[in-house]
Image (cartoon, rainbow, N blue to C red):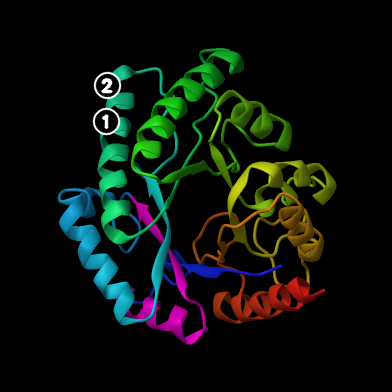
Amino acid sequence: MKLKLSCTDFSFPLLSHGAVLKIISLLGLTGVDIGLFAGRSHLRPEKELRNPLKNGKTLRRRLANEGLMATDIFLQVHENFTDFAINHPNSSRRKFARQQFLKCLDYAASAGSKHITILPGVKFAEESRKKSQARAADELLWRVERAARMKIAIAIEPHVGSLIDNPGRAMQLVVLVPRLGLTLDYAHFTRAGISDAKIEPLTSRATHLHARCARKGRLQSSFKENTINFSRALKALEHHRFNGWIALEYVWIDWEHCNEVDVLSETIQLIQHLVACAKC
């Protein structure tokens, strides 16, 4: 399998953004996933999306100076994933999320990214899961249609605490939204003790992959403790003619024990492992 490897710019939060880009380039990678996380990333939507065309162009130039290109823009419009979820029952909150998404489309196009990742929404306690799911599907259909006009792929990431917190629920949602992709991260399911075999069907809808080691009970683990079979995952992706980027996504934050591994060393080990797996 021919690999296209990138790294998330939010893997190294203690460094300046310029230093992060240099590290990613020094790792021998050519792609970088940009995190636009309200209140907590190097580049934040509350600033970058004020003038998306100009700021996207600036980012594209900065990346090019380091021999990099934007491989994904990961938009999170609020510091938590509930208050402005795409399927929030409050229409004014959904309107804000839509407005930010449209600006993100312009930003991605200007930055040279052909892929955007967003969160899938949550199950709201005051209503049935079916109703939360239906509203999410409507909102995602709206986004996919707008993105298609700009030839940008849209994907959602199934994650801990989301509407699609297991493989079955993830597949149910993407089936409702043709052309919607998945930014697939096995780790969110591995943490819950879900086997690779049960995660694997989602590779059929994957347009982007987040790669990091994990085990049951740990969203992020060392390579030594990892239980994800990356060789098997790559073969499943190849079977479905996956041609997207694989982003190394170790993070260092005080959440889900994610500050308990050496991000740089684990990233290097996983790069080497993925390259070896791809040759098998």
29 in magenta: yes
268 in magenta: no
Give the residue displayed 16% in from the left and 58% down from the top: 54
Extent of the magenta region: 16-37
Type of the residue with mark 2: Ser
Give the residue displayed 30% in from the left and 52% down from the top: 109
Q: Position of residue 170 (x, y in %)?
A: 65, 34
How many numbered badges does the structure rendering display?
2
Q: Position of residue 115 (x, y in %)?
A: 44, 51
Give the residue displayed 51% in from the left and 67% down from the top: 252
Q: Which residue is mark 1?
A: 96
SS state under label 1: helix
Type of the residue with mark 1: Phe
The picture quadrant where one finds residue 1 is bottom right
SS state under label 2: helix
Q: Is residue 219 visible?
A: yes
The answer to which of 270 and 202 lies nearer the viewer is: 202
> How far apart in space, not on screen, are marks 1 and 2 (Cα)?
6 Å
Q: Position of residue 148 (x, y in %)?
A: 40, 38
Q: Split into 4 quadrants, where in the image is the C terminus?
A: bottom right
Residue found at the very far bottom of the displayed protein: 26
Question: Residue 78 bears which disc, if any?
Answer: none
Category of crowding for the residue at label 1, using alpha-carbon neighbours closer than 10 angstroms: few (below 14), some (14–19), many (at least 20): some
Q: Is residue 158 left or right of residue 60?
A: right
Disc 1, disc 2: CB below 8 Å? yes
Q: Which residue is mark 2?
A: 92
* Above or below, comparing residue 205 to residue 209 in the picture: above
Q: Position of residue 93 (x, y in %)?
A: 31, 26
* Above or below, comparing residue 6 to residue 98 in the picture: below
Give the residue displayed 21% in from the left and 66% down from the top: 58
Q: Is residue 83 visible?
A: no
